[in-house]
Image (cartoon, grey):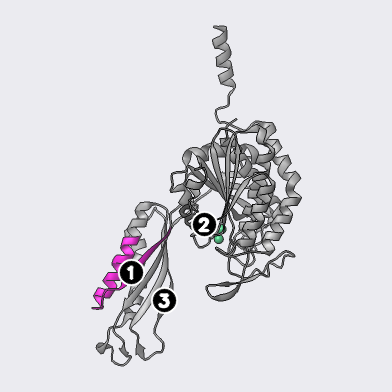
């Protein structure tokens, strides 16, 4: 009886939600604070030397060198310019942590002392390059988490697979790494984590279970007509009129066919056809994007776009158009169980007000490619701006905040990187064996 009572007491002492022991939690914070000067130097260097999709040679080399110094076994050129860094620390779960490596072909206009002036050739044209999506914040916090976990290796058991993924912005790097044997040549993860910087207050972490980013599909349609003189439309078939009808009518797929409670967007972003006013062209190209969260809405929108395109042409007695609907990437769907487990730790570490569930974003992410391989995953957001500035921006007439992909996007490095590194370290520690 006594023994049983002791066992019951011991059970009762275990909190309902597993949480990191307080000393371990404090240890992560102290270590991230202590290593910050290193992270700051790496961050500013990466920021000043950005590289676009599949050109991330210098970036990958730098991260590979730092990870080797930490004791990781590093393989380079996985999926062209990707890197895989493995750290084995006894029997336990294998956990993947992803950072992106790529920047954007655009000019930075922040005026920061470490702003990028780098240029490259993108799609055959010279272009500036800038880390305007915060992937440099992710790289610095990825390094920070790796170092904190190695320094605390006596506290956990398992295998870390830290990957530096190329070409996230073109939604092609995750596939390149998987096609190059990411889950065959290296241990397949039991869990995967990635974070993304978000234009909200630093010190905050946002997450949710289920779809957190959108499905993305590209529209590329060529409407065919029969060219002729602008004064004699009866002698031709006018693809401009067909395309114009399509652009308007396709919106009824969203407004009249889709469940209004569900998210779905169809945007036509480019129309090309014709040269001058008195010639009816032979063809018109229409390009756009389709976004959704659920597979059912995605299927409905794809079907609707195709149907309206064919009908618009049929109505004019034109040949059938060439309709290409190109899959850009699936929505990232977070594991309910992993989010619940991690949420407890994040709330404990950052406070209830600073660790919150957020709505999914309408952008897309190829982190979904790893999730699609059956890996329970969590993709979460960390803030990058001065909370006062964010608060002011939310007021009427307040100065708007620069979003990701803005030339003025300017995260505050120290609090942003520290929050992200701490959140990632704790999320990983929380699923590791003891
Ligand atoms: Zn981006
Ligand atoms: Zn991004």
Local secondary structure at mark 3? strand
Label 3: how many residues lie within 10 Å, few (<14), some (14-19) or many (20+)? some
Gap in Å between the C-alphas at discs 1 and 2? 30 Å
**In the rendered structure, which segment of residues is drawn in magenta?**
302-328
Q: In this rendering, is residue 8 above or below 309?
A: above
> Where is ligand 1, by quadrant?
bottom right
| Residue 346 seen in the current view | no
Instruction: Give me the residue at 51% from left, 42% from top.
Output: 189
Q: Is residue 322 left or right of residue 90?
A: left
Local secondary structure at mark 1? strand
Q: Nearer the viewer, mark 1 or mark 3?
A: 1
On residue 323, the disc is 1
Residue at mark 2: C-beta within 8 A of ligand 2: no
Instruction: Give me the residue at 38% from left, 76% from top.
Output: 285
Q: In this rendering, is residue 96 above or below 56?
A: above
Do the residues bearing badges 2 and 3 touch, measured as CB atoms within 8 Å?
no
Q: Which residue corresponds to mark 2?
A: 79
Give the mark nearer the N terminus: 1 vs 3. Answer: 3
Q: Which residue corresponds to mark 3?
A: 271
On residue 296, the disc is none
In the rendering, at what x and y percent does residue 2 appear?
57, 7
């Amino acid at each position: 009886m006594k023994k049983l009572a002791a066992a019951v007491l011991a059970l009762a002492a275990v909190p309902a939600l597993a949480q990191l022991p307080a000393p371990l939690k404090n240890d992560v914070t102290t270590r991230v604070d202590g290593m910050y000067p290193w992270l700051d130097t790496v961050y500013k260097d990466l920021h000043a030397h950005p590289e676009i999709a599949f050109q991330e040679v210098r970036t990958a080399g730098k991260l590979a060198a730092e990870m080797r110094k930490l004791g990781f076994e590093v393989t380079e050129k996985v999926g062209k310019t990707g890197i895989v860094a493995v750290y084995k620390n006894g029997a336990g779960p294998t956990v993947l942590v992803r950072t992106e490596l790529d920047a954007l072909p655009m000019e930075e206009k922040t005026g920061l002392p470490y702003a990028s002036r780098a240029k490259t050739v993108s799609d055959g044209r010279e272009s500036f390059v800038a880390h305007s999506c915060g992937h440099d914040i992710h790289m610095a916090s990825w390094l920070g988490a790796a170092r904190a976990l190695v320094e605390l290796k006596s506290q956990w058991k398992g295998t870390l697979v830290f990957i530096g993924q190329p070409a996230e912005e073109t939604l092609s790097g995750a596939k390149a790494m998987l096609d190059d044997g990411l889950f065959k040549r290296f241990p397949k993860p039991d869990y995967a984590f990635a974070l993304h910087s978000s234009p909200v207050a630093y010190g905050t972490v946002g997450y949710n279970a289920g779809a957190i980013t959108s499905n993305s599909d590209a529209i590329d349609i060529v409407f065919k007509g029969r060219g002729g003189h602008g004064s004699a439309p009866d002698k031709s078939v006018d693809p401009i009129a067909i395309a114009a009808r399509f652009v308007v009518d396709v919106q009824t797929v969203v407004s009249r066919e889709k469940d209004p409670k569900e998210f779905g967007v169809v945007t036509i972003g480019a129309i090309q056809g014709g040269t001058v006013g008195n010639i009816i062209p032979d063809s018109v190209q229409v390009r756009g994007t389709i976004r959704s969260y659920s597979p059912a809405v995605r299927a409905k929108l794809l079907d609707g776009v195709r149907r309206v395109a064919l009908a618009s042409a049929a109505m004019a007695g034109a040949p059938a158009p060439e309709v290409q609907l190109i899959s850009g990437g699936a929505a990232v769907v977070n594991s309910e169980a992993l989010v619940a487990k991690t949420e407890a730790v994040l709330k404990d570490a950052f406070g209830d007000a600073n660790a919150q569930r957020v709505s999914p974003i309408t952008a897309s992410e190829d982190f979904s490619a790893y999730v699609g391989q059956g890996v329970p995953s969590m993709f979460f957001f960390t803030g990058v701006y001065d909370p006062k500035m964010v608060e002011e921006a939310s007021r009427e007439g307040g100065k708007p905040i620069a979003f990701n992909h803005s030339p003025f996007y300017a995260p505050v490095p120290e609090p942003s990187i520290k929050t992200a590194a701490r959140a990632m370290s704790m999320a990983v520690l929380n699923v590791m064996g003891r």
